[in-house]
Image (cartoon, rainbow, N blue to C red):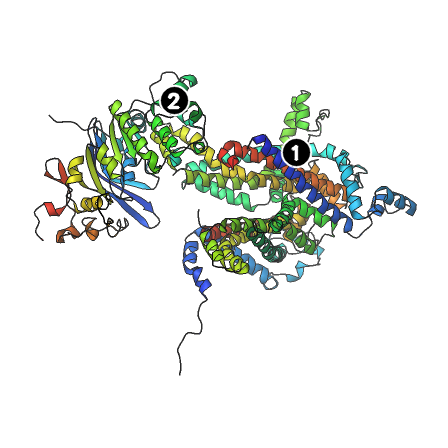
Amino acid sequence: MRTIETHISIPKWIEELELGKKWYKFSRSPLSLLGLVIACSTIILALLAPFLAPYPQHAGFYHNFMESCQGLSLKHPFGTDQFGRDVLSRTIFGFRYSLMMAGVVLLLVVPLGVILGLIAGYYREKIKIIEIVIMRIADIFIAVPPLVLALAICSVLTPSVFHAMMAVSLMWWPWYTRLTYNVTSSLKEEYFVQAAEVTGASSSHIIFKEILPNCLGSILTKVTLDVGWIILIGSALSFVGLGAQPPTPDLGTMVAEGGNFLPDFWWISLFPALAISYTILGFNLLGDGVRDTFVEER
Amino acid sequence: MVITPLLEIRNLHVGYKTHMGISKVLNGVYLTVNEGEKVGVIGESGCGKTTTMKSIHRILPGNAIVSEGEIIFKGKDILKMKKRELTEIRRKGVTMIFQDPTAALNPVFKVSEMMTDIIKYSGIYEKNLKKEARNRALDLFEEVALSDPERVFDSYSFQLSGGMRQRVCIAMSLAGVKQLVIADEPTTNLDVTIQAQVLSLLKSLVNEKRLSLILVSQALGAVRETADRVYVMYAGDIVEVAKADVLFTDPLHPYTQKLLDSVPRLTGGVFSIGIKGRVPNYFNPPSGCRFYPRCDQSLNICKDKKSPLVEVKKDHCVACWLYRGVST
Amino acid sequence: MKLSTYVIKRAGYAIFTLIGLSIFVFVLARVLPGDPARMAAGPRAPSWVVEQLREQLWLDKPIYTQYFYWLKDIIHGDLGYSIYTRRSVTQDVIEYLPASIQLIILAGIFEVIGALILGVMAGRYSYKWPDNLTRFISYIGISVPAFVWAIIFQLLFTWVMPIFPTSGMFSPLMIPPPEITGMSTLDALITGRFDAFVDVLWHMVLPALALCLGGMAQDARIIRAGMVENQEKDYIAMATSHGLPERLVTSKYLLKPSIVPAVTVMGMDVASLLGNAFLVEIVFMWPGFSKYGINVMLSKDLNAIVAVVLIMGLIFAIANIIVDVIVIHLDPRIGGK
């Protein structure tokens, strides 16, 4: 006896996301598409930096004073810096550090923040103390401008890329907690959640199967927009010397180093600065597109 | 004797531009209001009543397109007027009471702020004295039977009840010397208990000031009591016009018949049936009579051609081929 | 709820949060490797001096006792001793903070005015060229970080068109007004030194602009979105239908509800102003609290770092309360909750 059935069946929850329809909605906006293209291009540059950069060895500790501070030429389209390193190569490598920063921070922060937010929101009435503890601790980290506390934390630790990531992560999780908490608290009043509760569904089922899928749109939007913000904060930390240290080809560090050679050798800091803006612009446009696609207007 | 009507809408076509295309809502509306007359407009929701009323004041949303037609008020076409003339009409000619008083009152301003501005620009005062405006506002509030005028004057709209909000809106409408009041479902969003109060207030004010009235409503009983003549509107068309008592006792158009049938009766033992189907999709409306897909008595011709509005009995017009001697 | 009760409640809550923050920063500064007593005494001080200092700073006691004494000092206005400036941190705060505050206030003013002009223009002429222009400006404003603006302004105004000074607070030949409040603009006005006032203002233009452009761009977009949304509201139709002049409808009945969402996010804008000040003050050599902050951070001056964080938190909290009061004033519905 043989039954014929398709073995590759799309899980129901993926179908429910209606990705085809969402993509159609997203692709109708040229700005969103532009954002997608820019964001993808920065990711490709970051991943393939050793192959795309004309002088990969210039990314690290390298000097050739014969060629220092040369202007734009075919050999060095973005010129060279004070050590004779190719600015184009270093900028391409710079995307790596910026995106790695954003990636690591978000990987740490999003699961942690979201789960805390879900718990705090779900147990808002049932176990008040959980909500109070989580949300008050979150408030403490939101009470200072994020850049200020990140700077302070980095300064008491030894400045490095790793510590910068830790400091920014410590600043960032409360925003996800707060976002998920707000959405969860309002979803709890919705009929579908109440119906699930009445029928005796378990807490974990309600949290992860009923509430979480409805938070995903807002979370995804915030993640996309945050890539830009984290890159901004990361480059700011490096800029003042409390993040990545030379000779790391971090974009913020490069802007700061080049700042000493203004205005004569403007290319040393201009191109890394443009690269920062390019990345932030891309993820902002993408984030706007994601919001228009996934977050329903109310 | 020929009476020149106060307001005459002729062949009005209005559509809305959306991302799905143009939705053609109004499909040639005709409507006449004579001096001192009270006209009722009935029909299902979503059939273009509010669009018609808003076109009279030219306050349609930004994506609306008036493609054809005339709206003649005292001999002049409102649609062709310059800004200044239009403002004059808004201040001194026609006034409008909105469907939802909660949405119509600005949430971040006190009643006093809006009231003062409206009185200031209503064109009856030479001087713009604040005190004078306040007194006038309080007088108006007394007129619309608001119990505590002083308090209402200094309140935000969210501090008032629904009935009070609509009374405030009526008071605002009566701030200047007006000739025509358009009341667009003035009681739909109110509690059932105060609907009658607000309606009778409106009626008595209109009578007292000898104004003309267009009353748009889904409450057929209220229209029957108030209006002299009634227009029946369906999907952007006027399908029937008659004197109020005639229309309600002897409806001719199949739509009117069904609409009146759908009202639950105190005497009957059965539930009303309602009308099957729904208002058509305006992006791609039926080509002939727009009621054709829902009509039990439809003829072949209905599918392709819309019947013009024709007087079949005295003062009783209907847009239906059944009354034009067309054979099946 | 009355406004004053609300403010008191908010202030109490802010104090509670700040205490939490101070515990966090204090612990962070104490548990780190390194001997605070040795750092305070200096590397070449004899060991008995270090021991004496350790006792003096309560460093031999458990950490919660240390915190308790530290908090007690703070309540008395003593923020500790700075290794960087070799004097009391409180004195440093008094000297440097006013300069930063006046810079941030000016940046805030620029931000509000710019956002209003751009946002209203875009909202009023939505989908026409002013809207597209504003959108373009906004995207540039959002994607260029404040410190990059600072560098661009430095370049532009030092070498291309030197209309605005690009560093410091006074021109070289200007004699600063005597210190009364510490804010040089106010001092100049109080003492009638109009020339000094103009000079300071002139020096503040570029750093303030560099600070505010990002937030301005975002606020402009929020105002624009609010205006476009509210244009279709019934209350605007009603105001028009009563024959109110178009300009009055736009500038009063449309504008006020439309700016509420933008004002609500201005609390966050204050955060970005305070944070960015750290970078911008460095580039423009502005003798303010943020520049001091960076310097103490780079020299690991723990007492001063803790003070900087707490004072930034305090300013942020005050700014947020002010923003909330403005929001309630603009939209009384919010206060009713």
Residue C101, label in figure = 1
Residue C65 as seen in the image, left or right of residue C283: right
Q: Is residue A272 visible?
A: no
Whether residue B216 is visible: yes
Measure the alpha-carbon separation of dots 1 and 2.
Answer: 47 Å
Which image quarter: residue B156? top left
Q: Position of residue C39 (x, y in %)?
A: 83, 46
Residue A162: image x %, image y %?
Answer: 68, 56
Is residue C194 depicted above or below B53 in this figure? above
Labelled pair 1, 2 in contact (Cβ < 8 Å) = no
Q: Which mark is residue C299?
A: none
Q: Amino acid at mark 2?
A: Ala
Residue neighbourhood size for the residue with mark 1, other residues' Cα within 10 Å, grouped as few (<14), some (14–19), many (≥20): some
Position of residue C272 measured from the top left corner of the image (x, y, whole percent): 61, 42
Q: Amino acid at mark 1?
A: Ile
Name above or below for residue B175 compared with residue C167: above
Side of C294 relative to A212 (left or right): right
Which of the 4 quarters of the picture holds residue B307? Answer: top left
How would you rate the neighbour count of disc 2 (Cα within 10 Å): few for under 14, some for 14-19, many for 20 or more?
Answer: many
Q: Nearer the viewer, mark 1 or mark 2?
A: 2
- The residue nearer to you, when weighing C140 against C34, is C34
The chain under label 2 reads: B
Q: Chain of mark 1?
A: C
Q: Say the numbered circle drawn on residue B137.
A: 2
